[in-house]
Image (cartoon, grey):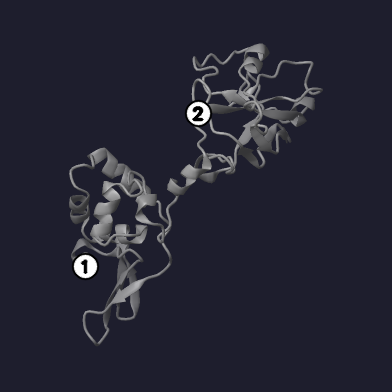
Amino acid sequence: FTGGKVEGEQGAPIHVVLVDANSGNVITSGPESCIKLDIVVLEGDFNNEDDEDWTQEEFESHVVKEREGKRPLLFGDLQVTLKEGVGTLGELTFTDNSSWIRSRKFRLGMKVASGFGESIRIREAKTVAFTVKDHRGELYKKHYPPALTDEVWRLEKIGKDGSFHKKLNNAGIYTVEDFLRLVVKDQQKLRNILGSGMSNKMWEALLDHAKTCVLSGKLYVYYPEDTRNVGVIFNHVYELRGLITGEQFFSADSLSDNQKV
């Protein structure tokens, strides 16, 4: 999103590595291993044919500049210095969306800064193509991983204020925590609430995303009778975690199927 920090998948830092084209090894020593790189914005359709051997001229001809009268397209740490052949991108922000160029996508590109590594051809780097949207869209952004307290539309396949969101709310499911608890207690009921509009593929993606949620350490213990000799332990979303009997704890993994029943 415009104005937001450019990050790798799931918020990971973005690294660049200098590699010997013949051996595939990282170049960790010599003058090339500590050069400076300039970060630029490329057209999304640059090098779509995956021919890795573009020329410097081809690369330069796909560099995107800001629209007339606008601020520079990319803002922040626009250079990276390699150390032993490896560098990490700093804070970068797009000031404009990508909807106005032909491919409607950008790539980040990196090239050797002038004055460095001129004795040898170092081919530029590029990321995959991605869309940059106006930050207003961030209000509708999914979370990776989702938090227990997140509203349920932060999950994949549940659009904010869409039909699935309304169906879940009408059934009393407002947060990711509510959702996960029903996954554990009665998955079929949850599937029925969402209805036939949700395909199996969407359901799988929704479940996979929900299950990346980091649970709190909260546990519940259930005592079937007042003597409290036996207690059943459940986690935050009511999954069986184990049994306490005779003051000993047995984890769910160590119980036989009989004991689980």
Q: Residue at x 66, y 29 (%)?
A: 69
Quarter of the rendering containing residue 29: top right
When the figure is inspected, residue 95 is found, relative to residue 50, above or below; the finding is below
| Mark in front: 2 vs 1 | 2
Left or right: residue 83 compared with residue 96: right
Q: CA distance from mark 2 to mark 1?
A: 59 Å
Q: Residue at x 32, y 70 (%)?
A: 250
At label 1, the amino acid type is Gln
**Can you give x and y, in whole percent of width and height, for residue 258 in the image?**
18, 65
From the viewer's side, name the closer residue of 118 and 151.
151
Kind of element beneath mark 2: loop
Q: Which residue is mark 2?
A: 99
**Can you give x and y, in whole percent of width and height, for residue 169 in the image?**
28, 58
When the figure is inspected, residue 141 is found, relative to residue 237, above or below; the finding is above
Left or right: residue 51 compared with residue 56: left
From the viewer's side, name the closer residue of 229 and 110.
110
Circle 2: is it few (<14), some (14-19), or many (20+) Cα within 10 Å? some
Q: Which residue is mark 1?
A: 259
Kind of element beneath mark 1: helix
**Can you give x and y, in whole percent of width and height, for residue 54 in the image?**
60, 13
Quarter of the rendering containing residue 87: top right
At label 2, the amino acid type is Ser
Q: Residue at x 43, y 47 (%)?
A: 140
